[in-house]
Image: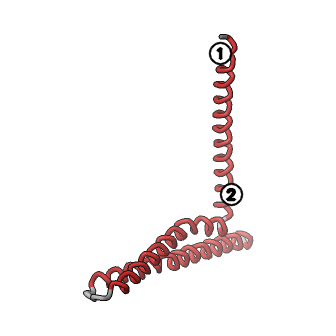
């Protein structure tokens, strides 16, 4: 009974850490996009006429920040995988099995393609000697 409670407690601990990591990653990576959206709304509402140099500078900064915010969204999407791999042993084991199956499938297809190419060349070489 005590051993079951310890295992149950460890699972909850790992799941809690995983969920905290996912939420923190989400908040950190989505915050720049929030700032970007607020800036775009504020900028579209204001009728501030400024100099051309200032507009060019603001436009350039906006593009750089927009690119950064998009990059952070990509990190958020891909970062969850690493959090799951770090926190869940079952996820690691199943991912490893699937990756091995994928590698075996790719190796099989590559070998089939190589054999097909070699078989085609050997036929071509025997035809040229027959003539």
N-terminal-most mark, 1 or 2: 2
Residue at 55%, 78% (x, y): give it. Answer: 24
- Which quadrant of the figure has residue 96? bottom right
Instruction: Give residue 17's mark.
Output: none
The 10 Å Cα crowd at callout 1, few under 14, some 14 to 19, many 20 or more, is few
Q: Taking the image as drawn, is residue 34 in sight?
A: no
Residue at 58%, 68% (x, y): give it. Answer: 79
Q: Rounded to the nearest whole Å, what is the CA distance between mark 1 and mark 2?
A: 51 Å
Residue 43 drawn at (x, y percent): 32, 83
Instruction: Give residue 127's mark.
Output: 1
Q: Taking the image as drawn, is residue 31 in sight?
A: yes
Residue 118 drawn at (x, y percent): 68, 28
Residue at 68%, 20% (x, y): give it. Answer: 125
Classify mark 1: helix, strand or loop: helix
Residue 115 drawn at (x, y percent): 68, 30
Q: Quadrant of the N terminus?
A: bottom right
- Which quadrant of the figure has residue 54? bottom left
Q: Quadrant of the C terminus?
A: top right
- Report the residue marked by disc 2: 93
Using the image, determine if residue 122 lies above or below residue 111: above
């Amino acid at each position: 009974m005590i051993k079951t409670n310890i295992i149950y407690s460890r699972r909850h601990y790992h799941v809690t850490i995983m969920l905290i990591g996912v939420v923190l990653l989400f908040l950190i990576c989505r915050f720049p996009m929030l700032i970007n959206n607020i800036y775009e709304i504020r900028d579209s509402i204001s009728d501030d006429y400024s100099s051309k140099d200032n507009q060019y500078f603001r436009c350039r900064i906006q593009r750089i920040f927009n690119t950064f915010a998009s990059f952070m969204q990509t990190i958020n999407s891909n970062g969850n995988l690493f959090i799951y791999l770090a926190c869940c042993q079952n996820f690691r084991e199943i991912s490893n099995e699937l990756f091995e199956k994928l590698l075996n499938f790719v190796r099989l297809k590559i070998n089939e393609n190589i054999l097909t190419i070699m078989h085609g060349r050997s036929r071509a070489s025997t035809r040229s000697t027959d003539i």
